[in-house]
Amino acid sequence: MKIDRDQVIKVLEQRKAGKPCHSCGNGSFELLDKFSNILIKDEIDGSLVIGGPTIPAAVVICNNCGAITFHALGALGLLGGGE
């Protein structure tokens, strides 16, 4: 599935997700051109399941300190199924 980067920015702005950085207070961010899948599991057991369940996420980085924030694409309504 292809996600439109401009649409992600639009939705984040609509939902007022542009508050200053949680780490340094800076107000300038960059949305990565790529997306991430955050691995989720039922237990912490040290194993890695390739192809297991994930949370597709947009990655936002503070331009000052490099703090990273993930935004779940499904919660933003960007995966098509209203997740």
Image: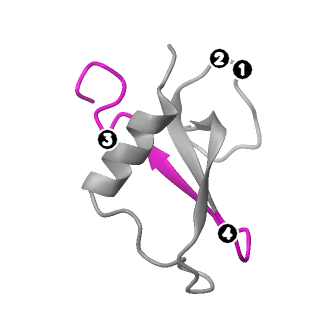
Depth check: give the residue in front, 71 or 12: 12
| Tag in front: 4 or 2 | 4
SS class, disc 3 = loop
Q: How is the image coloured?
A: one colour
Query: Magenta stretch: dominant SS?
Result: loop
Residue farthest toward the top in the current orientation of the protein: 1
CA separation, marks 3 and 4?
Answer: 21 Å
* Residue at 51% in and 34% down: 5
* Residue at 22% in and 27% down: 82
Tell me whether the residue at label 3 lies in contact with that at label 4, contact meaning CB atoms closer than 8 angstroms: no
Q: Earlier in the sequence, mark 2 or mark 3?
A: 2
Tell me whether the residue at label 2 lies in contact with that at label 1, contact meaning CB atoms closer than 8 angstroms: yes
- Residue 67: numbered disc: 4
- Against 1, residue 24 (above or below) is below
Circle 2 is placed at which residue position?
51
Name the residue type under label 1: Ile
Name the residue type under label 2: Gly
CA separation, marks 1 and 4?
Answer: 27 Å
CA separation, marks 2 and 1?
Answer: 4 Å
